[in-house]
Amino acid sequence: MTDARTEPRHVYLVRHGRTALNADGRLRGLADPPLDDVGVAEARAVASVIAALRPAYVFSSPLDRAAHTARIIAEAAGVFATTDDRFNDRDYGPWTGERKADVIAEWGSVDAAPGVEPVDDVLARARPALDDMLEESAGGDIVIVSHDAVIRPLITSIDPSRTTVETPTGSWNDLVRGADGWSVLATDQKPDPQPRSV
Protein backbone atom coordinates (compact mmCIF):
# COMPACT_ATOMS: atom_id res chain seq x y z
CA MET A 1 0.00 0.00 0.00
CA THR A 2 1.39 3.41 -0.97
CA ASP A 3 1.91 5.95 1.80
CA ALA A 4 0.16 9.14 0.69
CA ARG A 5 2.81 11.17 2.48
CA THR A 6 5.54 9.81 0.18
CA GLU A 7 3.66 10.01 -3.11
CA PRO A 8 5.33 12.67 -5.27
CA ARG A 9 3.42 15.94 -5.17
CA HIS A 10 4.19 19.08 -7.08
CA VAL A 11 4.25 22.59 -5.70
CA TYR A 12 4.11 25.25 -8.39
CA LEU A 13 5.70 28.40 -7.00
CA VAL A 14 4.26 31.30 -8.99
CA ARG A 15 5.38 34.88 -8.88
CA HIS A 16 2.55 37.41 -9.06
CA GLY A 17 1.98 39.62 -12.08
CA ARG A 18 3.57 43.00 -12.56
CA THR A 19 2.71 46.16 -10.61
CA ALA A 20 3.67 49.79 -11.23
CA LEU A 21 6.41 49.45 -8.58
CA ASN A 22 7.87 46.46 -10.42
CA ALA A 23 7.82 48.39 -13.67
CA ASP A 24 9.69 51.28 -12.00
CA GLY A 25 12.34 49.07 -10.37
CA ARG A 26 11.19 49.85 -6.83
CA LEU A 27 11.22 47.56 -3.81
CA ARG A 28 7.68 46.40 -3.07
CA GLY A 29 7.92 44.56 0.23
CA LEU A 30 4.84 45.10 2.36
CA ALA A 31 3.57 47.91 0.14
CA ASP A 32 0.37 46.77 -1.52
CA PRO A 33 0.18 48.04 -5.10
CA PRO A 34 -2.36 46.34 -7.38
CA LEU A 35 -1.51 44.52 -10.57
CA ASP A 36 -1.19 46.85 -13.52
CA ASP A 37 -2.63 45.94 -16.94
CA VAL A 38 0.49 44.00 -17.85
CA GLY A 39 0.30 42.19 -14.51
CA VAL A 40 -3.31 41.13 -15.07
CA ALA A 41 -2.36 39.81 -18.52
CA GLU A 42 0.59 37.94 -16.98
CA ALA A 43 -1.68 36.43 -14.33
CA ARG A 44 -4.15 35.25 -16.97
CA ALA A 45 -1.37 33.77 -19.08
CA VAL A 46 0.19 31.82 -16.21
CA ALA A 47 -3.29 30.75 -15.07
CA SER A 48 -3.97 29.10 -18.42
CA VAL A 49 -0.80 27.03 -18.06
CA ILE A 50 -1.19 26.18 -14.38
CA ALA A 51 -4.89 25.28 -14.73
CA ALA A 52 -3.95 22.65 -17.32
CA LEU A 53 -1.79 20.98 -14.64
CA ARG A 54 -4.97 20.44 -12.57
CA PRO A 55 -3.82 21.70 -9.15
CA ALA A 56 -5.98 20.81 -6.18
CA TYR A 57 -5.19 23.89 -4.07
CA VAL A 58 -4.07 27.49 -4.56
CA PHE A 59 -2.43 29.46 -1.74
CA SER A 60 -0.89 32.92 -1.79
CA SER A 61 0.61 35.78 0.11
CA PRO A 62 -2.13 38.09 1.42
CA LEU A 63 -0.76 41.09 -0.51
CA ASP A 64 -3.11 42.18 -3.29
CA ARG A 65 -0.73 41.54 -6.18
CA ALA A 66 -0.29 37.90 -5.11
CA ALA A 67 -3.87 37.31 -3.95
CA HIS A 68 -5.27 38.73 -7.22
CA THR A 69 -2.96 36.51 -9.27
CA ALA A 70 -4.00 33.54 -7.13
CA ARG A 71 -7.70 34.25 -7.65
CA ILE A 72 -7.21 34.32 -11.42
CA ILE A 73 -5.36 30.98 -11.28
CA ALA A 74 -7.90 29.43 -8.93
CA GLU A 75 -10.83 30.48 -11.11
CA ALA A 76 -9.14 28.99 -14.18
CA ALA A 77 -8.42 25.76 -12.28
CA GLY A 78 -11.87 25.52 -10.68
CA VAL A 79 -10.58 25.58 -7.10
CA PHE A 80 -10.49 28.03 -4.20
CA ALA A 81 -7.64 30.39 -3.32
CA THR A 82 -6.52 30.84 0.30
CA THR A 83 -4.00 33.32 1.72
CA ASP A 84 -1.20 32.46 4.14
CA ASP A 85 0.91 35.15 5.83
CA ARG A 86 4.02 32.97 5.75
CA PHE A 87 4.31 33.58 2.01
CA ASN A 88 4.21 37.36 2.46
CA ASP A 89 6.89 39.43 0.74
CA ARG A 90 10.14 40.35 2.44
CA ASP A 91 9.87 43.46 4.59
CA TYR A 92 12.19 46.15 3.22
CA GLY A 93 11.48 48.47 6.13
CA PRO A 94 12.36 52.10 5.39
CA TRP A 95 13.49 51.18 1.87
CA THR A 96 10.03 50.07 0.76
CA GLY A 97 9.14 51.98 -2.40
CA GLU A 98 12.73 53.06 -3.04
CA ARG A 99 14.49 52.19 -6.27
CA LYS A 100 16.37 48.94 -5.81
CA ALA A 101 19.36 50.28 -7.77
CA ASP A 102 19.61 53.29 -5.42
CA VAL A 103 19.58 51.09 -2.31
CA ILE A 104 22.30 48.88 -3.78
CA ALA A 105 24.35 51.93 -4.75
CA GLU A 106 24.16 53.26 -1.18
CA TRP A 107 24.63 50.04 0.80
CA GLY A 108 26.31 47.61 -1.60
CA SER A 109 23.30 45.25 -1.54
CA VAL A 110 19.70 45.20 -0.40
CA ASP A 111 20.71 42.72 2.32
CA ALA A 112 23.11 45.26 3.83
CA ALA A 113 20.54 48.07 4.09
CA PRO A 114 19.47 48.60 7.72
CA GLY A 115 15.94 47.58 8.60
CA VAL A 116 15.55 44.98 5.85
CA GLU A 117 14.13 41.60 6.92
CA PRO A 118 16.99 39.05 6.82
CA VAL A 119 16.74 36.27 4.25
CA ASP A 120 17.09 33.75 7.08
CA ASP A 121 13.91 35.15 8.64
CA VAL A 122 12.07 34.85 5.33
CA LEU A 123 13.14 31.21 5.09
CA ALA A 124 12.27 30.53 8.73
CA ARG A 125 8.62 31.29 7.99
CA ALA A 126 8.29 30.18 4.37
CA ARG A 127 10.32 26.95 4.25
CA PRO A 128 8.31 25.04 6.90
CA ALA A 129 5.13 26.30 5.24
CA LEU A 130 5.93 24.28 2.12
CA ASP A 131 5.72 21.04 4.08
CA ASP A 132 2.74 22.28 6.06
CA MET A 133 0.78 22.96 2.87
CA LEU A 134 1.24 19.34 1.80
CA GLU A 135 0.61 17.86 5.24
CA GLU A 136 -2.55 19.87 5.79
CA SER A 137 -4.09 19.15 2.38
CA ALA A 138 -5.74 15.92 1.35
CA GLY A 139 -3.67 15.22 -1.75
CA GLY A 140 -3.03 16.62 -5.18
CA ASP A 141 -0.67 19.30 -6.41
CA ILE A 142 -0.48 22.80 -4.98
CA VAL A 143 0.04 26.32 -6.33
CA ILE A 144 1.65 28.96 -4.12
CA VAL A 145 1.65 32.54 -5.41
CA SER A 146 4.33 34.60 -3.72
CA HIS A 147 7.15 37.07 -4.31
CA ASP A 148 10.64 36.92 -5.81
CA ALA A 149 12.27 37.58 -2.42
CA VAL A 150 10.48 34.51 -1.05
CA ILE A 151 10.64 32.20 -4.07
CA ARG A 152 14.38 32.55 -4.76
CA PRO A 153 15.50 31.64 -1.21
CA LEU A 154 13.06 28.72 -1.14
CA ILE A 155 14.48 27.33 -4.36
CA THR A 156 18.12 27.73 -3.33
CA SER A 157 17.40 26.21 0.10
CA ILE A 158 16.21 23.07 -1.69
CA ASP A 159 18.80 23.10 -4.49
CA PRO A 160 21.86 25.27 -3.69
CA SER A 161 23.12 24.82 -7.26
CA ARG A 162 20.26 27.02 -8.50
CA THR A 163 22.11 30.30 -8.09
CA THR A 164 20.79 32.15 -11.15
CA VAL A 165 17.03 32.00 -10.59
CA GLU A 166 15.52 35.27 -11.82
CA THR A 167 11.81 34.79 -11.02
CA PRO A 168 10.28 37.33 -13.45
CA THR A 169 6.73 38.46 -12.80
CA GLY A 170 4.16 35.98 -14.07
CA SER A 171 6.61 33.05 -13.97
CA TRP A 172 6.39 29.71 -12.21
CA ASN A 173 8.75 27.12 -10.77
CA ASP A 174 8.11 23.40 -10.40
CA LEU A 175 9.08 21.75 -7.10
CA VAL A 176 8.29 18.17 -6.14
CA ARG A 177 8.36 16.38 -2.82
CA GLY A 178 8.70 12.62 -2.88
CA ALA A 179 9.98 9.88 -0.62
CA ASP A 180 13.51 11.33 -0.78
CA GLY A 181 12.46 14.88 0.04
CA TRP A 182 12.28 18.00 -2.09
CA SER A 183 13.75 18.63 -5.52
CA VAL A 184 13.50 21.45 -8.07
CA LEU A 185 12.39 20.32 -11.52
CA ALA A 186 12.16 23.66 -13.34
CA THR A 187 12.59 27.38 -12.69
CA ASP A 188 11.69 30.66 -14.39
CA GLN A 189 8.99 29.19 -16.63
CA LYS A 190 6.99 31.79 -18.56
CA PRO A 191 3.93 31.25 -20.76
CA ASP A 192 4.45 31.45 -24.48
CA PRO A 193 3.76 35.10 -25.36
CA GLN A 194 2.49 34.10 -28.79
CA PRO A 195 -1.06 32.74 -29.07
CA ARG A 196 -1.07 29.14 -30.23
CA SER A 197 -3.16 28.15 -33.19
CA VAL A 198 -5.78 25.51 -32.48
Image (cartoon, grey):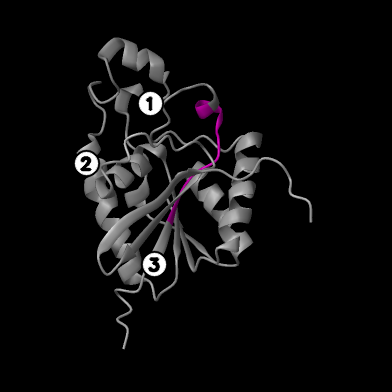
Does 142 lie within the magenta span?
Answer: no
Residue depicted at x 39% and y 67% = 9
Residue 132 position within the rendered picture, expressed as x and y whole percent measured from the top left: 29, 64
Q: How many numbered marks have been drawn onto this rendered protein structure?
A: 3
- Identity of the residue furthest to the right in this view: 198
* Stretch of the chain drawn in magenta: 12-22
Which comes before the other along the chain, label 2 or label 1?
1
Real-space Cα separation, disc 2 to disc 1, in angstroms: 17 Å
Q: Is residue 23 above or below residue 162?
A: above
Q: What quarter of the picture does the C terminus occupy?
A: bottom right
Tell me the amino acid under the disc marked 2.
Asp
Residue depicted at x 64% and y 44% = 192
Tell me the amino acid under the disc marked 3.
Arg
* Residue 178 visible in the current orientation: yes
Q: Is residue 42 left or right of residue 169?
A: right
What residue would you read off at disc 3? Answer: 9
Residue depicted at x 43% and y 23% = 97
Asked whether disc 1 touches disc 3, contact meaning CB atoms under 8 Å apart, the reply is no
Q: Is residue 50 left or right of residue 149?
A: right
Residue 110 position within the rendered picture, expressed as x and y whole percent measured from the top left: 30, 23
Tell me the amino acid under the disc marked 1.
Thr
What residue would you read off at disc 1? Answer: 96
Which label belongs to residue 121?
2
